[in-house]
Amino acid sequence: MEDFKFLFKVVLVGNAGVGKTCLVRRFTQGLFPPGQGATIGVDFMIKTVEVDNEKVKLQIWDTAGQERFRSITQSYYRSAHALILVYDISCQPTFDCLPDWLREIEEYASSKVLRVLVGNKIDREDREIPTVVGEDFAARHNMYFLETSAKEAENVERLFMKIAEDLMQQARSKDLPRYDSNTTNISGRTSAVSDNSCCSKLA
Amino acid sequence: MEDDTKTRFAEKHQDLQQELDKLKSQEEELFKEMQSFITQKSHVDAKIKTLGKIVPTLKNLKLEAQTLVNTIHDIAESSETISNKVRNLDRARSRVEECQQRVGDLIDLELCSQGVQTAILNEDYEKGAGHVHRFLSMDQSLLQRTATDVENISSVLKAVRTLQDAASQLRTIVQHKFDEAVKMEDLGSVERFFKIFPLLGMHDEGITKFCNYLCGKLEETAQKNLHTALNTSLSDKRYNVIYADTLTLLFEGLARIIDIHQPLVETYYGPGRLLSAVSLLQKECDKQVKRIIIEFNKHRQVNKKINQITEIGKMSNSSSFSKIEKFDPKEVDILIQEITIMHVRVELYIKFIRRKVLGDIEISTAVAEERIKSIAALDKLINSSDLSRSKHELLSHYLQLEQYFMEESVSKAVSMDTPDNSQHTSSMVDDTFFIIRKCIRRAISSGSLDGICAIINNACGVLENDFCAILRGRLRQGYPSGYLDLTQAYNVLQTSIQQGRLQPGDTEQIRTAFIIALNNADASTEYVETLCDSVLYDVQQAIPNMNTNERGKLESCLSGLSSVITNLRDVIEYGMQQLRASAIKPRISPWVDSFLNINHQLSEDELSEYEAGESFVQTLIMNLDSLLSSFKESLTSSNYDGLVKMLTTEVTARLEKVILKSTFNRLGGLVLDKEVRALASYLTTTTTWSVRDKFARVTQIATILNLERVSEISDYYGNEGSLTWRLSPPEIRTIMGLRSDFKSDDVRRLKL
């Protein structure tokens, strides 16, 4: 069994072609795959990071942006700890769809989910959405905001690390008092489900 | 001034002293080093002596090595000369071969040019094409060069021209003949000319023409099949899956075409041609699949149902009264079944194509890069096909319908809930898990891992949000206190549930509903566990070659499902707390509190009198027994254990409190010790786990109160391994203070 204290599910959503898969690949494998085909259904990656000397396992669900996969991807919202909503700063329509995505998030995700807005592809010259517009949208909807480039590896690490830190803080403040007297139980509900417990036995 | 000099002198002195010390230590070190040199000397001497002995041997060795080098050099030179000769010979031989080839070509050229015209005249196209093929296989530029080398240039050039003419003539004829054969539906001739194309170097034309012919055939059959499907009567037993059947027929037809013609293509066109053939066939496949799906959507009213579901979803979300009539989940049950069959057929066909083409690529391309390119082309062909798109749409429809089916069926199961007399639970548990299992199994039968995972996720949502919430809601009603008779309550509840609603205020019914909800939660934990195990097993059977990523995906979704158990445990815990507050605590407190009314400072006579009568503990046990037995029959065993555990905690805590409010003499302590033991042993018999731990404090309190003398505590306290004390030293002193016959000074003087 791996030794990690926390496990968080992070789900990426957003229109097709905004670079969700590239963000995940850049973060988990450190590469930028050119000519990436459209994702089919959902993809699944894992990366363990360290926050405050604690191992944190991030389970990253990379969803297909195309409409016809919506009923598959929606089923992952409910158990997500963090949702990353991605748009392409060089493509206005991907930004215009954000309210639709938010509506979907409202409908299916937990109200406590950590929501992050990401404007990707800042390496591109033909920007259509100024940074301040993205910032403003994020602020209005109570989201954390970041602009990234999966191609140039800009802010990608920071994005996921920030999420890991926030989620860990959240988990600690929420769960420590409750389980203070009974430390053995921590792995049960707090979101840290151990790797082997998946099919039957929970601690 | 003098002082200054003195201090300076002192400093100097100190410095000097330090310097001296340093020198001394250096000297010591040097001395040590010298010592070691001296000890090493003899050793070094011995070494030098041995080295001296080796020197002549080394000289010999050097000479011999030199001779060896010379010999090797000679050998190298001679071998160089030999290999040079061999190379020359080789060159000569290859020239001879080339020459032979040219002569052979010339002879063949002559023969071919003579034969080809006769063959064409005789309509023996195979023979003619054979001649052309032989001609094409010759190196054309070489042929020109040969022609200039040979004396009679004109005859060679003439032969070449004849053959070139014949080739183009044959090409036109064969194309024409092929088209004619297709028009005449002369399968024999179609195949005959199909085989001739590659001989004339028309591989691509041949494949294209032939595949177009096959596509035409395919279209014809597909149209006929679809027509039959559309005319199937409602009473036909395949009516409910007729579109799945039509789709199956189409794929079977395609698979048959590929299976039959692959060897033909491979023999006459060589391996590596399957991908281009398949991509031509795929166009027709896409067209036909689209047609079937359009008819399917139209006749099964798929989109209408999906829209209805979306509308219902929106309505319930905005929490206004639903204006749209919900339809019975059973209505979509059959449709869902058909969609899963259609989906799995598409899945299987795609797998079939992949396997076939990959096999062909495997044998035809040896270069890894080429192979990767071909595989990428295959993936692109499959992923961008309408077939794949249709597959994804089928899955999407399936998921939406299945979600509706699952949610509605579960809510129906809840609304039709009836207690199960033989068990401790009610029908909603069995029904809910039956439905969820059915849905997941159906997802598995669709053959799509993404579909399976999505349904597992949705099932998780239904269990956590709907199912657990309903159980919790019933427990929130609380457990009204007062006396009860559960068997009677059971019957009342049953009839009232069957009639419709629970009447609020009817405590018996609320009690029974409460107990059943508690039991339902407990039974559900087991169901979830079994479900997880069986799903994992079933998926492994259905999709045997999952890679680690796919497996991880599945396991992660299953771990979400098994975390429902945690939710259920919370529900049980919540129910137990409700029970404690309303049914256990208020009953137990007065029973235990009666301890305060009893004299614990007994004389010998009073003791025997007390023991003859009904003692405190007997009454308490009797009361507890009747309380527990009222629950024993109605609770599941693990819930009953939970109840006993909670009750034990309550009783011991309360007992501790009243003991601390009383005073004892020696005999009073003796009685208490006996009574505590009796109580502990009674509670042990009621349950499967040990209550000893919960009794630890009270037992230790009784032990202290049962001491002969203050000093006797040292038998129990302080020596290693005697007892793990749950009481702190101040607590022990307080408890000893309860003994009226212990002197407080003695107690204070105790060393604990």
Image (cartoon, coloured by chain):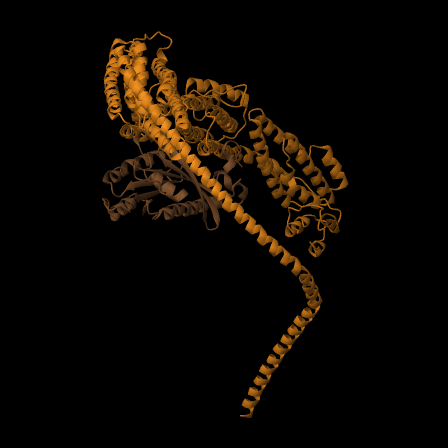
Chain colours: A brown, B orange
What's the residue at 27%, 21% (across, down)?
B205
Is residue B724 among what the camera can see? Answer: yes
Query: In terms of depth relative to the viewer, which is nearer, A151 or B47?
Result: B47
- In the rendered image, the vertical position of residue B58 relative to residue B722, given as above or below: below
Query: In terms of depth relative to the viewer, which is nearer, A65 or B498?
Result: A65
Query: In terms of depth relative to the viewer, which is nearer, B435 or A8?
Result: A8
Is residue B302 among what the camera can see? Answer: no
Query: In terms of depth relative to the viewer, which is nearer, A6 or B21?
Result: B21
What's the residue at 69%, 37% (across, down)?
B677
Report whether A95 appears left or right of B508.
Answer: left
Q: Which residue lies furthest to the front in this view?
A: B151
Q: Residue furthest right?
A: B604
- In the rendered image, the vertical position of residue A159 relative to residue B16, given as above or below: above
How many numbered discs?
A: 0
Q: Which residue lies furthest to the bottom in this view?
A: B1
Report whether B26 appears left or right of A160.
Answer: right
Q: In x, y percent, where is residue A167?
A: 41, 45
Q: In x, y percent, where is residue B703?
A: 70, 44
- In the rendered image, the vertical position of residue B265 relative to residue B32, given as above or below: above
Q: In x, y percent, where is residue B212?
A: 28, 18
Report whether B454 appears left or right of B168.
Answer: right
Q: In x, y percent, where is residue B286?
A: 30, 21
